[in-house]
Amino acid sequence: MVTLRKQTLLVLDDDDVFHRIMTLANKPQFFKNICHFNEVDVVIAYLKNNRNNHFKLPDVMFIDLGMPGKDGWSFLDAYAEIYGSLSKRIKVYIVTVSVRKVDHERLSGYPFIEQLITKPISMDKFRALARLNDLAA
C-alpha cells in the first residue's frame, strides 16, 4: 500500500476568484495547505526568509504571469536568483491566460518550471496536478 504525503501549495495570483477556485478545488484536501499571495515581493521575501526551513517552504507553486505592477516575469527573474539556495526543490507551474508563442518560448529559459497551464484551470486538471505532486512518502 502506498502512503501519500500531503503537500503545501503556494498560489501567486492577483485574481481573488482564482484563489477561491483553488480553495474549492482542494476539497477533499488534496494539498494539506494552500498559501495565497497576490504580491511578488511578499512571496520572494517569504522564500528568502525561510530558505533553510524545509517545513515552511511550499512543495508546489502556481504562478500567474499577468499581474499589475511586478508580474509573474518579475517573480521568475527573482526566483531564478534564489531557487538554488532553498533547502528543498519546489515544483513551479505557470498558470496563465497567455497563449502567446513568445511567452511560451521565454518560459523555456527558466529550468525550474515544471509545466505551463492555460487558464481557466479545470477541477480535474487541478486534482490531477495535486495527485501528480502528492508523491509516495
Image (tube, grey):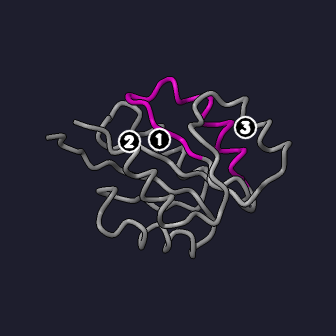
Residue 51 lies in what quarter of the image?
Answer: top left
Q: For the residue labelled by badge 1, is the local secondary structure a helix, a strand or a loop?
A: helix
Q: For the residue labelled by badge 3, is the local secondary structure a helix, a strand or a loop?
A: helix
**Residue 44 among magenta residues:** no
Q: Give the mark toward the camera: 2 or 1.
A: 2
Specify start and end residues of the magenta stretch as a single range. Answer: 70-93
Please state the horizontal and vertical placement of residue 50, each as a whole percent of the image.
39, 39
Q: Nearer the viewer, residue 115 or 58?
A: 115
Do tag 3 and tag 1 residues touch (Cβ < 8 Å)?
Answer: no
Do tag 2 and tag 3 residues touch (Cβ < 8 Å)?
Answer: no
- What residue occupies the far front of the structure in this picture? 1
Q: For the residue labelled by badge 2, is the local secondary structure a helix, a strand or a loop?
A: loop
Quadrant position of the N terminus in the picture: top left
In the rendered view, tell whether residue 35 sits above or below residue 93. below
Residue 19 is labelled as none
Write the residue at 29% across / 67% down. Answer: 28
Mark 3 or mark 1: name the one nearer the start of the chain. 1
Q: Give the mark toward the camera: 3 or 1.
A: 3
Write down the residue under mark 3. Answer: 107
Residue 58 lies in what quarter of the image?
Answer: top left
Mark 2 or mark 1: name the one nearer the start of the chain. 1
Q: Nearer the viewer, residue 121 or 22?
A: 121
Mark 2 or mark 3: name the one nearer the start of the chain. 2
Do tag 2 and tag 1 residues touch (Cβ < 8 Å)?
Answer: yes
Write down the residue under mark 2. Answer: 57
Q: Residues within 10 Å of mark 3 (few under 14, many from 20)?
A: some
Residue type (three-letter) at the residue carrying disc 1: Leu
Write the residue at 80% across / 44% down. Answer: 103
Residue 47 is labelled as 1
Quadrant position of the C terminus in the picture: top left
